[in-house]
Amino acid sequence: MKNKEGAMSALSSMLRGECFEVKRQFIECEGIEFLIEVLKNDQKFPSKKLKTKAMNILSDIVHYDHILNYTNVHDATNPGYKYAQQMNAKTNLHKPEEQKSGGGAKLQYAKYKDCVKKTLFKACFLMIG
């Protein structure tokens, strides 16, 4: 059990924070489904510490879910974003990733916006009451 807790701690360290590329890779390899399994399956994952770590990771990913289509959090939350977008329309500064390079990356990153919440709804793990 200690190995599982250590692995979950390492995973938490990698995923928490503002590194969107790592979050996207985790989502791609069905990481959200894995976290749901950890939280739901008491026989395979009985440790409360393991479940707490899984919930912390999930909470962090849900927190950034609505802006995962951006390159980083600063592009999405910068107060001067709209102004910078207008003033620097010809540069890649402060643009969502899908708008860079003429929309070539649009299909690559657009799918990540709100994808975590959708996965949680599908798994009946998150419900609006």
Image: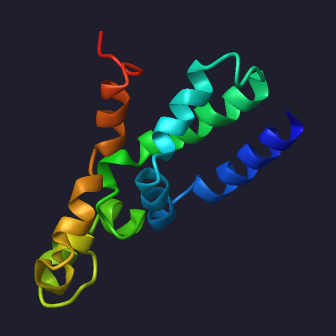
Q: Position of residue 100 (x, y in %)?
A: 20, 81
Residue at image point 41% right, 55% down:
28
> Is 48 displayed left or right of 17 in the figure?
right
Q: Quadrant of the N terminus?
A: top right
Q: Residue furthest front?
A: 44
Residue at image point 16% right, 79% down:
104
Residue at image point 29% right, 61% down:
69
> Is 81 displayed left or right of 63 in the figure?
left
What is the quadrant of residue 128 in the picture?
top left
**Residue toward you, 86 or 50:** 50
**Residue toward you, 56 or 124:** 124
Q: Quadrant of the C terminus?
A: top left
Q: Position of residue 107 (x, y in %)?
A: 18, 66
What is the quadrant of residue 74 in the picture?
bottom left
Residue at image point 40% right, 67% down:
72
> Is 85 displayed left or right of 121 in the figure?
left
Q: Residue furthest top?
A: 129
Q: Position of residue 51 (x, y in %)?
A: 68, 27
**Residue toward you, 95 or 88:** 95
Q: Position of residue 121 (x, y in %)?
A: 31, 26
Q: Is residue 91 above or below residue 32?
A: below
> Is 67 displayed left or right of 48 in the figure?
left
Q: Residue furthest right?
A: 2
